[in-house]
Amino acid sequence: MKKEVPKYDHWTYIAFVVLNLAVFGPAVWIIYMTHNRLGSNVWVTLAFGTIILAKLATKRLEDRIIEERDITDLVLENDD
């Protein structure tokens, strides 16, 4: 019988939160501090750029976790 491996453990969710805070926190602060001096187009560009960077970083982390999960599945199958 194949053992079920959870998709993510609680440390992975904590890593996602920390990653998103690390990317969004400074970006939101910069946007807030400069939005009065910059035009709205710059504000929108900064916001979308930040979102794209966070999504790319999260996707890369998810791919790495899936790769490690596949290795774990292979090890568990060989243990049977």
Image (tube, rainbow, N blue to C red):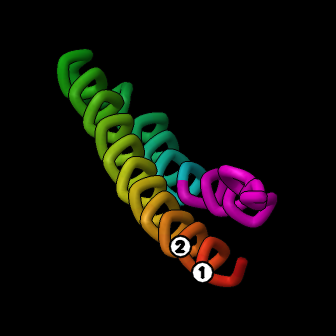
Give me the residue at 68% from left, 61% from top.
Answer: 12
**Residue 24 screen position, x and y as percent:** 50, 46
Please tell me whether mark 1 or mark 2 is closer to you in this view: 1
> In which image quadrant can residue 52 be found?
top left
Q: Residues within 10 Å of mark 2 (few under 14, many from 20)?
A: few
Q: Whole-Å distance between the Cαs marked 1 and 2? A: 6 Å
Which disc, if any, is residue 43?
Answer: none
Look at the numbered discs 1 and 2 and tell me whether their residues touch, using CB distance below 8 Å: yes
User: Toward the viewer: 71 or 36?
Assistant: 71
Up the image or down, 43 lies above or below 25; here it is above
User: Toward the viewer: 22 or 55?
Assistant: 55
Residue sticking out furthest to the top: 40
Give me the residue at 39% from left, 48% from top.
Answer: 59
Q: Looking at the figure, which quarter contains the N terminus? A: bottom right
Q: Tell me the amino acid under the disc marked 1.
A: Asn
Up the image or down, 37 lies above or below 16; here it is above
Give me the residue at 66% from left, 75% from top.
Answer: 76
Q: Which residues are magenta?
A: 1-19
User: Toward the viewer: 11 or 76?
Assistant: 76
Which disc, if any, is residue 74?
Answer: 2
Q: Tell me the amino acid under the disc marked 2.
A: Leu
Whether residue 4 is in magenta: the answer is: yes
**Residue 26 screen position, x and y as percent:** 48, 53
**Residue 22 screen position, x and y as percent:** 54, 59
Which disc, if any, is residue 78?
Answer: 1
